[in-house]
Image: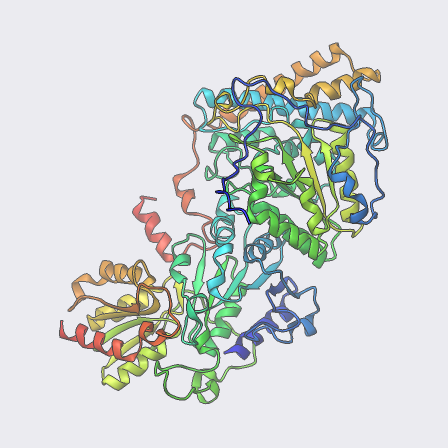
């Protein structure tokens, strides 16, 4: 997935001179996860460069660059580090078009590695997507595989509005079925790991059905997509698994059609439960599918605690918890 | 070893609160013309003295003196006087309109007119300002229509910002005026980003960031300083030290530093303090900084020393937190009077011409107001379409907003 993201940057920079890439360690070194490797060498340090350790500085400068007419693609080294930039994201980038009646816009992409599963402890594991989906003016994207990561990132760069691009870091080096004790599998032999070198986009706001099924609907994104898939296969449940891909704007059409078909819905995310994005999903499913529901909606999420270190796999909503949720929603 | 004594917290307080006698005797003010004018390429470490003094051009006799004088001819000075007088008239009319309930809120510039009016004349069209809410002189001196400013203040049907923003939070891209934020300080680093973009694009245009004394405490200020310094961005960073952040005196943000300008030293940014009530000094220092930026010499930090003679906004009463006598004791005087006296001294202005100009400006501002009020005010007449609230959240309205707009009845 790293190579797909790197390649997307490369193609965007080649195609559009206005695209500039910066962030902590992204220049010479190519990023701590190597997502921008080689870009400075190829495009020069005027278009790909290191930034001081100042997240509000990075996003604030990017807002100014947008006002000038550039298209910055910035990296926040970990989503956990974005809080100093939150004012610039929420009060500035997100509202720029609206408050200036279209005089100024913010066509920027803010990339950040998200989620746990790598023993990152509480400062390298968080999933803050709900802090962004609550904000009018932002788009929020979470890819689950290399092909989508590339196509969605290119779509995000093309997009005229600010896009928060959350990259599940557990998926950088391979798909993950939630069984942390099994050997790591790479993307190499995975169908979605085979990514064309050509320029292509995956449209924002469109979910993808990863597995068709009739027993229940799973709403998931990022890391949890393949965990849900593994759980369904292990439990022998004919689940329809929807990979949301874009959380805002949400593809309600795909969600609605599926839940109306299955009558049951399980929502899965790694972030904490209370006021998490699952709460929004649960509400929209209830609003649009109430009379089709055969059972209460069930959420499987991280616990409402800081993301722990040694207890990482107790926190993580793994296959066993998902299987129990399947059983619960099928009983109802 | 003696036993440790209990610690106590130091909370800075101004020397003068209501009922006290104002005392500015600690404020060291050099004679006009006394402060040197460094070469634009002088090393930052060799001009640290500039942060501890005050560049002044106009002396008490109304003469322009010293190495910073001589940039502007009489015609330019009369124009500058007119801009400041217009801004003051504009403020008076809009304050009155707010008191009459025609809008919700207003912020005036009383005593600070020289800062934005003079600065604007030192920059070029095409340069970009990232202002705070107290630099409307940038618009007035830049020729932006006053009627459009009033349309914005009234949030009426002709408001260029469609009724979305608080009064005075203007935006005028074509006039090099970035959309004002009520979240203080955010624009300072954005100005640096704009300047970096200009450099990345091999452009020749420069940016100017603006911030108040109080907001220099925000992290955006420090981010801006680091970025401007590291990338040598073509930007002028302006701190307007008007002594008061609502009811908090400037010492709270300044802390143990002697001046705000000295903040630049740790970043290796040339930093200079200027008499903000001296139109000629502000213009000269701004021109110097602009030349530095345009020559690829990087950022300059300017501290404009001035005094906020009015309230912070229409929502506060300054007599509740500071002495009423403070402005009359303020040692740098009043910018319109000072420029007027200079023009009279050099034989380029007179009381008669001043009275005449004031009458013309009053008529002009009144005519603009009439025109704006024909488009409506916040409480009466034509208003922006409620439907417009849903526009511009995104370039293309996503389905969930379309549904909400329908639900709202539009």
Residue A251: give x, y in percent of width and height.
35, 65
Q: Measuring 74% from the left and 25% from the top, which residue is drawn there?
A: B79
Q: Identify the image quadrant of the C terminus of chain B.
A: top left
Q: Is residue B329 shown to the viewer in this render?
A: yes
Q: Nearer the viewer, residue B153 or B68?
A: B68
Q: Measuring 47% from the left and 33% from the top, which residue is drawn there?
A: B155
Going by the image, does A26 lie left or right of A120? right
Residue B309: give x, y in percent of width and height.
59, 23
Residue A175: give x, y in percent of width and height.
42, 82
Going by the image, does A197 lie left or right of B296? left
Q: Measuring 48% from the left and 88% from the top, which residue is drawn there?
A: A188
Residue B205 higher or lower than B115, as above or below:
below
Going by the image, does A204 lie left or right of A23? left
Residue B409 higher or lower than A54, as above or below:
above
Taking the view exactly as shown, the residue that stands out farthest to the left is: A332
Quadrant for residue B242, please give it.
Answer: top right
Q: Nearer the viewer, residue A115 or A95?
A: A115
Quadrant for residue B399, please give it.
Answer: bottom left
Taking the view exactly as shown, the residue that stands out farthest to the top is: B352
Q: Nearer the viewer, residue B29 or B318?
A: B29
Count of marks, rendered view? 0
Q: Nearer the viewer, residue A274 or B178?
A: A274
Residue A30: give x, y in percent of width and height.
61, 73
Q: Is residue A209 shown to the viewer in this render?
A: no
- Give the colour scheme of this rendering: rainbow
């Amino acid at each position: 997935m790293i190579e797909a993201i790197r390649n997307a940057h490369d193609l965007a920079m080649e195609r559009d001179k206005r695209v500039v890439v910066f962030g902590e360690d992204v220049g010479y070194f190519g990023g701590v996860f190597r997502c921008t490797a080689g870009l400075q060498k190829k495009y020069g340090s005027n278009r790909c460069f290191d930034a001081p350790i100042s997240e509000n500085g990075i996003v604030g400068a990017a807002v100014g660059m947008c006002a000038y007419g550039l298209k910055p693609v910035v990296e926040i080294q970990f989503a956990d580090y974005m809080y100093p930039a939150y004012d610039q994201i929420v009060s500035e980038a997100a509202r720029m078009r609206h408050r200036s009646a279209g005089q100024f816009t913010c066509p920027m992409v803010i990339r950040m590695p998200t989620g746990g599963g790598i023993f990152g402890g509480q400062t390298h594991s968080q999933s803050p997507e709900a802090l962004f989906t609550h904000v009018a003016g932002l788009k929020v994207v979470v890819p689950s595989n290399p092909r989508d990561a590339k196509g969605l990132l290119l779509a995000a760069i093309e997009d005229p509005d600010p896009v928060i691009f959350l990259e599940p870091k557990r998926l950088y080096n391979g798909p993950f079925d939630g069984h942390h004790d099994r050997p790591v599998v790479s993307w190499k032999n995975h169908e979605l790991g085979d990514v064309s070198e050509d320029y292509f986009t995956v449209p924002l706001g469109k979910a993808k059905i990863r597995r068709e099924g009739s027993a229940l609907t799973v709403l998931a994104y990022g890391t949890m997509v393949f965990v849900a898939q593994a759980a369904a296969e292990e439990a022998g449940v004919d689940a329809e698994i929807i990979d949301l891909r874009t959380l805002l704007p949400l593809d309600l059409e795909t969600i609605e059609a599926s839940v109306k078909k299955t009558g049951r819905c399980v929502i899965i995310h790694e972030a904490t439960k209370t006021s998490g994005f699952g709460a929004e999903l649960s509400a929209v499913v209830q609003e649009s599918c109430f009379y089709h529901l055969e059972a209460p909606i069930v959420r499987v999420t991280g616990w409402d605690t800081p993301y722990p270190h040694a207890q990482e796999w107790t926190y993580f909503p793994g296959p066993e918890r998902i299987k129990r949720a399947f059983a619960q929603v099928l009983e109802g | 070893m003696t036993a440790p004594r209990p610690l106590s917290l130091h909370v800075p307080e101004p020397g003068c609160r209501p009922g006290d006698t104002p005392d500015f005797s600690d404020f060291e003010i050099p004679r006009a013309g006394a402060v040197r004018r460094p070469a634009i390429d002088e090393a930052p470490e060799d001009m640290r003295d500039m942060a501890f003094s005050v560049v002044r051009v106009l002396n008490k006799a109304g003469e322009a003196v010293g190495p910073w004088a001589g940039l502007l001819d009489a015609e330019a000075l009369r124009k500058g006087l007119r801009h400041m007088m217009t801004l003051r008239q504009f403020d008076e009319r809009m304050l009155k309109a707010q008191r009459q309930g025609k809008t919700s809120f207003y912020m005036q510039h009383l005593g600070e007119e020289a800062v934005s009016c003079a600065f604007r004349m030192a920059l070029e069209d095409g340069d970009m300002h990232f202002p705070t809410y107290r630099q409307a002189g940038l618009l007035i001196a830049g020729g932006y229509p006053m009627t459009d400013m009033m349309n914005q203040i009234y949030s009426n049907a002709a408001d260029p910002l469609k009724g979305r923003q608080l009064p005075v939070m203007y935006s005028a891209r074509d006039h090099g005026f970035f959309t004002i934020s009520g979240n203080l300080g955010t624009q300072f680093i954005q100005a640096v980003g704009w300047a970096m973009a200009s450099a990345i694009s091999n452009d020749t245009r420069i940016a100017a960031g603006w911030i108040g004394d109080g907001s220099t405490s925000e992290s955006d200020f420090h981010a801006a300083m680091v970025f401007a310094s590291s990338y040598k961005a073509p930007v002028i960073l302006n701190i307007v030290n008007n002594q008061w952040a609502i009811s908090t005196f400037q010492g709270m943000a300044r802390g143990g530093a002697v001046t705000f300008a000295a903040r630049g030293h740790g970043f290796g940014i040339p930093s200079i303090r200027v008499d903000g009530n001296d139109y000629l000094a502000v213009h000269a220092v701004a021109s110097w900084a602009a030349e530095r930026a345009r020559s690829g010499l990087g950022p300059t930090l300017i501290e404009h020393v001035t005094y906020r003679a009015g309230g912070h906004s229409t929502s506060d009463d300054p007599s509740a937190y500071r002495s009423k006598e403070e402005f009359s004791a303020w040692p740098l005087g009043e910018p319109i009077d000072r420029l007027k006296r200079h023009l009279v001294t050099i034989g380029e202005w007179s009381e008669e011409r001043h009275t005449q100009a004031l009458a013309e400006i009053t008529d002009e501002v009144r005519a603009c107001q009439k025109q704006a009020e024909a488009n409506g005010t916040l409480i009466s007449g034509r208003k922006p379409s409620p439907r417009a609230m849903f526009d511009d959240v995104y370039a293309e309205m996503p389905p969930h907003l379309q549904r909400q707009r329908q639900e709202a009845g539009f």
